[in-house]
Amino acid sequence: MEVDYIIVGLGLAGLAFAEELSQNNKSFVVFEDHSQTSSLVAGGVYNPVILKRFTPVWNAKEQLEIALPFYHSLEKKLGSNLDYKFSTRKVFKSIEDQNNWYIASDKPILSEFMNPKILKEKVNGIIGDYGFGEVYKTGRIDTHKLIEFYRKRLEEKDQIKYEKFNHSEIAFTDSSSTYKGIVAKQIVFCEGFGLKQNPFFNYLPLNEAKGELITIHAPNLNIQFLVKSTLFILPIGDDLYKVGATFNWKDKTSTPTDEGKQELIDKLKKVIDVPYQIVDHSAGIRPTVKDRRPLVGVHPKYKQLVVFNGLGTRGVMIAPSLAKELYKHLENGEEISKEISISRYKKTLLQ
């Protein structure tokens, strides 16, 4: 069997690259072993503003210009709604928060995303004595539905194999690689934090940050926007809300914990004052990089091997544009941006 590419992993990165190949009539096969769950349990929110500091997300405008049409085309292809648009409201904790909001919303790079007026009306169920700041052009991609539907589509075309990828079974020639009888021009690794076990790319400084979410049923809350405070409260319909997320740098498992749940419960007490019931609890490992930039590029020695990883907490926004950039690099020889290229860590390999 011969294909243009083998993709290892079908989270947001693998899916975005697979779709880029599909749109350009390139052949591929995906290996997926269900070991990485961050995309499946993610909130899936896209938001162009970092609300902790009132600063713009890196390349937010450019990312959204590619990402939103990308998901719209997938809605048509998969025959299902994936993009749920809403505004986001930041809960202010002080007058200083309000003043910082005024200053940030006046900046040209942020003005199209931030309402300059403070929303002061009370919202039933939300504790917010200092009002709210409103962010436009935010929403949620249902990542669980997206990945499940995309997997089924690949199954129908016999383009996905549900098995663990064994790196030691790759055989190289000058212009291709072979894995279990499949000859491919290049193998693209989109393994999430599984990259730590990849002998070709484990020199890269990928960190694992465990995140836990709970889903609550709160009939008296009745909000149609995302609330951002010490945690986020995300409406998903039928009086259900995703609440998260924790950050744990020590626990490397994808198992929900009582400690994580209790942390979310304690924080939620300070954000809402209506009764609720916890109906679900999930966890996943985010692949993050210290400089908050993804890891994209070709292996410095084995040119048949490629990495596409480290999307962090903003994979929904980043994945489509980076998949396009990676494709242009591999097929047309266009340079990868220095900010995301793994060449910034090449010295680590050579030491």
Image (cartoon, helix red, strand yellow):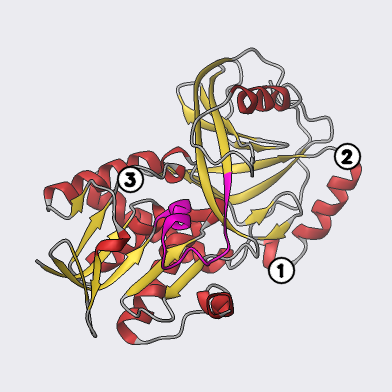
Specify whether residue 269 is painted magenta.
no
Residue type marked 1: Pro
Query: Dot 3 surroundings within 10 Å: few (below 14), some, or many (20 or more)?
Result: some
Q: Position of residue 187 (x, y in %)?
A: 29, 68
Q: Position of residue 85 (x, y in %)?
A: 49, 44
Give how far apart the Cα atoms at labels 1 and 2 are.
Answer: 24 Å
Identify the element where label 2 is drawn. Answer: loop
The circle drawn on residue 147 is 3
Q: Position of residue 62 (x, y in %)?
A: 52, 69
Decide if residue 203 is on the left or right side of residue 308. right
Q: Nearer the viewer, residue 194 or 153?
A: 194
Q: Residue at x 41, y 76 (%)?
A: 299
Decide if residue 187 is on the left or right side of residue 105. left
Query: Dot 1 surroundings within 10 Å: few (below 14), some, or many (20 or more)?
Result: few
Q: Position of residue 39 (x, y in %)?
A: 43, 45
Identify the element where label 3 is drawn. Answer: helix
For residue 74, above or below residue 111 = above
Q: Nearer the viewer, residue 102 or 91?
A: 91
Specify start and end residues of the magenta stretch as a single range: 191-209
Residue type marked 2: Ser
Residue type marked 3: Ile
Residue contact between numbered discs 2 and 3, judged by CB atoms under 8 Å: no
Specify whether residue 200 is painted magenta.
yes
Circle 1 is placed at which residue position?
A: 108
Res 282 visible: yes
The circle drawn on residue 94 is 2
Taking the view exactly as shown, the residue that stands out farthest to the right is 95
Among the two numbered marks 2 and 3 on one chain, the one whose residue lies closer to the N terminus: 2
Q: Residue at x 84, y 46 (%)?
A: 98
